[in-house]
Amino acid sequence: MKLRRNIATSESGFVFNPTNGDSFSTNPVGTEILFLLKEGMSFREIKDALVNRYDAEPSVVEKDIDDFALALKGFNLLEYES
Amino acid sequence: MKAKQKEKRVIAVTGLNAIDSPGPGVAVIRALHDSEEWDLRIIGLSYEALEPGIYMNDIVHTTYQIPYPSAGTSALLQRLTEIHAEENIDVIIPNFDAELFNFIKIGDKLKEMGIHTFLPTLEQFEARDKLNLFAFGKKHGFLVPKDKTIFSIEEIPSASAEFGYPLVVKGKYYEATVAYTLEQAQKAFHKLQAKWGLPIIVQEFVSGTEVNVAALGDGEQCISAIPMRKLYITDKGKAWAGITLEDPTLIDLAKKFCKETGWRGGMELEIMRTLDGKPYIMEVNPRFPAWIYLTVGAGQNQPASLVKLALGESVSPFTDYHVGKMFIRYSWDLIVDVEKFQQVSAFGKI
Amino acid sequence: MEKLKYERPSIKQLNAGLMNKFGLKTEYNPVTHIDGAPVKQIIADYGSPVFVMSERQIRKNYQNALRAFKTRYPKVQFAWSYKTNYLSAVCNVFHQEGSWAEVVSGFEYNKALNNGVPGNKIIFNGPDKREEDIRLAIENDSLIHIDHFDELYFLIEICEKLDRKPRVAIRVNMDTGIYPMWDRFGFNYESGQAWNAINKIMSTDRLELVGLHSHIGTFMLSTSAYAVAAAKLCDLAYHFKLKYNQNIQYLDLGGGFPSTNTLKGSFLPGADTVPSIDEFAEAITTTILNYGFRQDELPLLMLETGRAMVDDAGYLLGTVLATKRLSDGRRATIMDFGVNLMFTSFWYDHKISPAQEFSHHTEDMVVYGPLCMNIDVVRESVSLPLLQRGDNVVVHKVGAYNMTQWMQFISMRPNVVMVDMNDKVHLIRRAEKLEDLQMMEVMPEYLEKHEL
């Protein structure tokens, strides 16, 4: 899964979808995930990156990323899978 | 060449929702700017990120989000303390019915912090509430339509026996329907109960011409009163245009109202003048109306006078105003970058 | 390299909706201690969920209420409303403070006796008094508050058999301008029923009428209704004196004072809108004082306030079992406590605080209990920090009615502890065990065996 190409993100945690005009805000971990997604990382790679950086169980991070991905999908921020 | 340096004043104002059913905030701010009394800094206080006043940067210098009234006084006081530390506020003018209870409650604490307000007392605020208005009118000798607070549909016939049809069926907080038959009254009862809960208010129907008076009381007497008749009404029941009237009866009523109640602050009297000329008070709004800028046009700047009163200056009552001044409301599209909206939404400050 | 503190990722749509006057509020300041006792330690020692009663808050509430009335009126007596919270340790805090007992069943009556309350300091209220209960109350010289004519006649009958003359009061219901009118309890004032009951009592020689009682409603937000109630009781007492030349010894204004909880659907929080005990005291005492009794004939004023005394002294500590996302994208948080323990969540928006620090990021969520039942909703919509499985929370103001109306449903009832005046934690009711519940069950022999 990938973030839609035209989604604008900022360091302060703002997300703007120019296609439909929706705006969002994310907390720091959320901001980081979006940033890594933009870099082209997969969710799996993101999980490893977060586990390295943060004091958290891999299983917890995995569950949270899945949940976050669900939210992104719900907000129409992800590319459709082909 | 300036004759003298104007005093710096920081005034915070709520009700920046200048939308199709507008709050009075933007009109109050325009009135303050027009007075040219002070070197003004206007702080907007908003509840929603899309209140247009937030983005009117030529008249509102900065805006802070404040917690919803439902969050209670302690959350409000905490937020205002933060804002005060940044801005050093002199006066706050709240403009929403729903927030007044909280602002009145914390009035003393704000004063200790050096923030002035000019609001009615809690007793005055509650006495003019829809549920208590009839008793209020009776006590002070004002004409107020008879009403009855009812909890059951069975009570409608006894009310109609007293008032006759048509009668007005009103919800606890908002909405009113005129019912011409028992069936219509029952239908309205069910609808309003479902929406706003019990009790329901059944009120005598008074027919006539609706007029409004914007007034300001200093706690003892009436400082200003401007009567206005709506010329055009939107589908939301709001004035689109209105005109100032010459009507000594209404001015006298406002004067009597301020004197009898010791009203402190701005207000709007909603009045029905019957065919034989009697002024019935239909509602008392405990704050300025959205059309308050018309008072400036008419020559009595009520918001600026309120600020002076709040700061402890005495203001002598106005005597004259222009009759036949009109306001015509218009909408105006502001152009804003999304960053500003995001800034307000996420950080609560702009 | 030291790892950073983790918080689960969150994304929130920035509200571009219509102006909303009835918004949500955030409740995210952490509560880490109940009085001086650490929340985490209490959970470690007594499990989760666990109810916590603050002895300090109970005494403070009682003393404040007593001060409010005593500084205004010379003769005041409180009676602890057992049904509000009849855990014996809680009752005894009130009894140590000087409260009598107010009970509404034989079970509660015996509980009060077991707690060491002298029989003549027990007020026996309610529509359900069985013969054995009434006999016991008569033996013990308790104050019997008569609820209906059937009870009045029944009582007279028992007194004839026992040849005793108990002290009684009648409960009076009346129109105080509030809705609903509690006319299902007691004798009606306006219709003359109450006066008839008084005359009936005086016409037999079997009962001694010493008091008049009213209890006009619950969670009352109007102080003036109490002034009306007090005036109507004074009226009865006055006419009683005129006709029988005896004094009514006490007026019992009952309870019904609200706590500062926020009722569902109310616009402003309870803490801002609920009248204080002083305001109720002022309304009641000025009415009685101004009624025109002779100073030496002023009746004793009794009060049975429950909720306002104990609600904010009770907390429920719990733990997040899971967080999940509902089909519409909303966050749902499942706690290890639900409506089985918090009956009051049906009518209050209970405040929930996290028990540990979080960032300022919050999420709107629905808070569910652990029951496998759709009705198990603790908060329909609340903004809370980014809670994770295992995080602890503190629910506020659960001291009234929950520890009496809780249900043994699906799971068993947890420990209840009390934090004393020195912040020491005491177990006051241990968690139920399977054996406790099995103990009451009886298995018919033919059902003992099966082959699966």
Image (cartoon, helix red, strand yellow):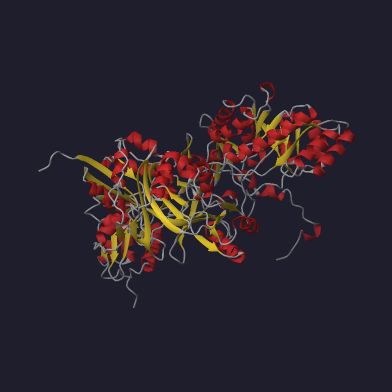
Residue at figure coordinates x 74%, y 32% from the top left? C239
Find the residue positioned furthest to the bottom. Answer: A82
Question: Where C60 falls versus C357 (above or below)?
Answer: above
* Residue A3 in sight in this render: yes
Question: Where C97 falls versus B160 (above or below)?
Answer: above
Q: How many marks?
A: 0
Find the residue positioned furthest to the front. Answer: B276
* Residue C44 in sight in this render: no
Q: Nearer the viewer, residue B250 or C387?
A: B250
Q: In the rendered view of the protein, which quadrant contains the C terminus of chain C?
A: bottom right
Question: Where B16 falls versus C170 (above or below)?
Answer: below
Where residue B344 appears, as percent x and y from the top left, is 29, 55
Q: Would you identify the image quadrant in which residue A80 lies?
A: bottom left
Find the residue positioned furthest to the right. Answer: C161
Where residue B181 appears, as percent x and y from the top left, is 60, 65
Where residue C245 appears, as percent x and y from the top left, is 78, 26
Find the residue positioned furthest to the left. Answer: B1
Where residue B348 appears, as percent x and y from the top left, is 31, 52
Question: Where B116 falls versus A36 (above or below)?
Answer: above
Q: Would you identify the image quadrant in which residue A1 lies?
A: bottom left
Q: Nearer the viewer, residue B233 or B248?
A: B248
